[in-house]
Amino acid sequence: MSWIDVGALNIVKSSKPPDNQKLYRVQVGAFSNRGNADALLKKLKSAGFTDAFIK
């Protein structure tokens, strides 16, 4: 597994997509271990990604 340096990301916060534009979603990982998924979720949220969640 490779880890992302969340400090290197350019975080742009927006409350909603601009009018008449498509909304894109990004999946940052697929895990066989729930603990690893939770650890990355915590890291992403601490970096400012408020819409991060585990399905």
Image (cartoon, rainbow, N blue to C red):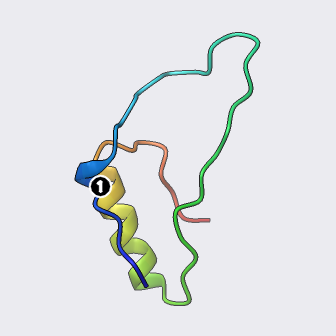
Considering the image in quadrants, where does the C terminus appear?
A: bottom right
Q: Position of residue 22 (x, y in %)?
A: 74, 27
Q: Residue furthest bottom?
A: 32
38 left or right of 28? left
Residue 47 shows in this picture: yes
Quick one: label 1, few (<14), some, or many (20+) residues within 10 Å? few
Residue sitting at x 54%, y 64%: 54
Q: Position of residue 30 (x, y in %)?
A: 58, 76
Residue sitting at x 29%, y 55%: 6
24 left or right of 7? right
Q: Position of residue 21 (x, y in %)?
A: 73, 19
Q: Is residue 48 above or below residue 37?
A: above
Q: Position of residue 16 (x, y in %)?
A: 58, 21
Q: Is residue 51 above or below residue 3?
A: above
Disc 1: which residue: 6
Q: Is residue 30 above or below residue 52?
A: below
Residue 46 shows in this picture: no
Considering the image in quadrants, where does the N terminus appear?
A: bottom left
Q: Residue furthest top?
A: 19
54 left or right of 8? right
Within the image, what quadrant is residue 38 found in?
bottom left
Q: How many marks?
A: 1
User: What secondary structure is found at the residue carrying circle 1?
Assistant: helix
Residue sitting at x 33%, y 73%: 39
Q: Amino acid at mark 1?
A: Val
Q: Is residue 23 above or below residue 43?
A: above
Closest to the observer, 11 or 54: 11
